[in-house]
Amino acid sequence: MPDWEKRFRAPRVSLPDWAEDAPDHSLFVSNATGTYELYAWDRATGGQRQVTDRPNGTTDGVLSPDGRWVWWFDDKDGDEFGVWRRQPFEGGADELATPGLEASYPAGLALGRDGTAVVGRSTDEDGTTIHLSRPGEDPVEIYRHRESAGVGDLSHDGSLIAIEHTEHGDAMHSALRVLRPDGTPVADLDDTKGGTLELGLEILGFAPVEGDARLLIGHQRRGRWEPLVWDVSTGEESDLDLDLPGDVGAEWYPDGTGLLISHSFEARSELFRYDLATRELVRVPTPPGTVSGATARPDGSVEYLWSSAAEPSTVRSTTGRAVLDPPGMKSPGSVPVEDVWVEGPGGRIHALVQRPAGSTGPLPTVFDIHGGPTWHDSDSFAAGPAAWVDHGYAVVRVNYRGSTGYGRAWTDALKHRVGLIELEDIEAVRAWAITSGLADPSRLILTGGSWGGYLTLLGIGTQPDAWTLGIAAVPVADYVAAYHDEMEALKAMDRTLLGGTPEEVPERFEASSPLTYVDQVKAPVYISAGVNDPRCPIRQIDNYVKRLESRGAVHEVYRYDAGHGSLVVDERIKQVRLELDFAERHLPTT
């Protein structure tokens, strides 16, 4: 078995979640059976068992605070439209968790200690609705709005419910509202007032203390994400004002006296403990690389999921003890990343470069573009780029305007000229890759998934002489058709990005749609698509493919029976193998 395949097959685990009132009861995700599923873990006995077993996998699950129940979201073949079910932690039959609520797209979930559940739902017909579900009672609707919203958290005593909403119509910047269980508003916090500030807020969680009304939130008032503590009962805001240059997130320590700080800066991350009484910030030791999740345990220790581009992910603890070490095959490592900064039309662009060990350029080069678009590539382990490196390619990943981790202005620059702005940054890095001697200009592959797949199709159409091949996974291909077919929350995001609907701003949708430029495409095109995908629906991809077919363009299409990606290891390996084979057959040799 080649190393690239071992990286996909090697058993891996997520950071374990744990029940607040029963910390020995944990829940994690693993691909141990060849499909990503939920697993329950009793730390006291060491026993582990598989909770879910579905053909297309399951990753959305949460423990009840008392640790008695595992809640998991049941959709159909990855379409993300379904209902919550629950199963006893020790095992047993699944049951409908919230009888009386019809299937929907999920919009957040918060569980109380008395069996109460606050359930967020999103549908094309109703927009967002939030319901209070109590054992033995019919669910009660406590919130409804046409624009997107979601459940944030439920206070420790169940008396307060925090939600994020975009009633102002800007899906990129949420406002906050706290409700009582009967739906009565208690307090509002809105940094978007007037529609000019364009500042967002996010809910990080209520204090884990009985009767405590402090809510930890994230804000962007100084041009980046930072935490503050909002006392809902008094309205007092305690700004931490941390002297850290990048985006900062936080969660509570279990006793409510401190915060676990996660700091992301220039594609790497680190952890700190912040004492709320002394305002002292103390580093939590972690290796250089990326912490993709962390949690503070009741004993004061911190568990975190760590990796780097060269080293596969592991769950570690500040105690030095192993947390979860799945048995079986170990994943091979890869090569480290090099940091590159390139001057672009909107400022300095950060790119991450990997190349085969000992290689000299110019090399066939893959520009692997991240999705989101509000996401960023980091110094973390990724099996896909490592597979390209194994086959002799250099890999370049670009944190274009729209990416997170470089300040609010960089993320929010993605407006109205959607897609075209990102491609300006990618083009600047492409030019650097050629002039630096890294990349062979006759062997350049543009690829990515989701938003990265969208940028791939848009790029080979608007920059037809720049790219040798285009490989797009689950892309937006026809922006107008995609808007009409996608889930409601994504419609709200598109209205924010483009300034309206296709009927209101048709010229913007046309300028940003790959379908507009399909007749200019020169490069061979490979497209993979999930037939149940609610984010990048199949009809709009078929529209694009028909245009390719009508002009006899070189292309291949692979459709698979899942949604926005696959949780089945064999399927993912098949897709990577098809992409590598397509490149081998169509890329010029030297």
Image (spheres, rainbow, N blue to C red):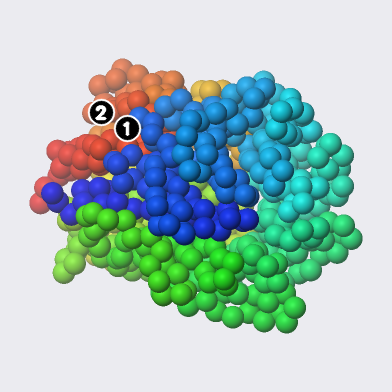
User: Mark 2 or mark 1: which comes first in sequence?
Assistant: 1
Q: Where does residue 182 sit, x and y in percent of width and height?
A: 84, 36
Report helix, strand or loop for mark 1.
strand
Report helix, strand or loop for mark 2.
strand
- Residue with the most extreme left position: 590
Which residue: 68% across, 64% down? Answer: 227
| Residue 331, quarter of the rendered image | bottom left
Which residue: 39% across, 31% down? Answer: 54
Q: Where does residue 583 sit, x and y in percent of width and height?
A: 20, 42
Which residue: 42% across, 27% down? Answer: 77
Q: In this rendering, is residue 138 above or below 369?
A: above
Q: In this view of the protein, can residue 158 be seen by the observer? A: yes
Which residue: 53% across, 23% down? Answer: 485
Q: Could you tell me how far apart the alpha carbons at marks 2 and 1 are, in whole angstroms?
A: 6 Å
Q: Name the side, left or right, on which 342 lies relative to 200.
A: left
Q: Where does residue 482 sit, x and y in percent of width and height?
A: 51, 27
Q: In this rendering, is residue 103 above or below 403?
A: above
| Residue 489, quarter of the rendered image | top right
Q: In this rendering, is residue 73 above or below 178?
A: above
Name the residue nearer the viewer: 311 or 300: 300
| Residue 275, quarter of the rendered image | bottom right
Q: Name the side, left or right, on which 317 lies relative to 328.
A: right
Residue 560 image label = none
Residue 556 image label = 2
Count residues near mark 2 (Cα–Cα under 10 Å), then give few for <14, some for 14-19, many for 20+: some
Q: How many marks?
A: 2
- Residue with the most extreme front position: 45
Residue 527 image label = 1
Count residues near mark 1 (Cα–Cα under 10 Å), then give few for <14, some for 14-19, many for 20+: many
Q: Looking at numbered disc 2 in the image, what kind of residue is underneath it?
A: Glu
Q: Looking at numbered disc 1 in the image, what kind of residue is underneath it?
A: Ile
- Say if mark 2 contacts mark 1, CB within 8 Å: yes
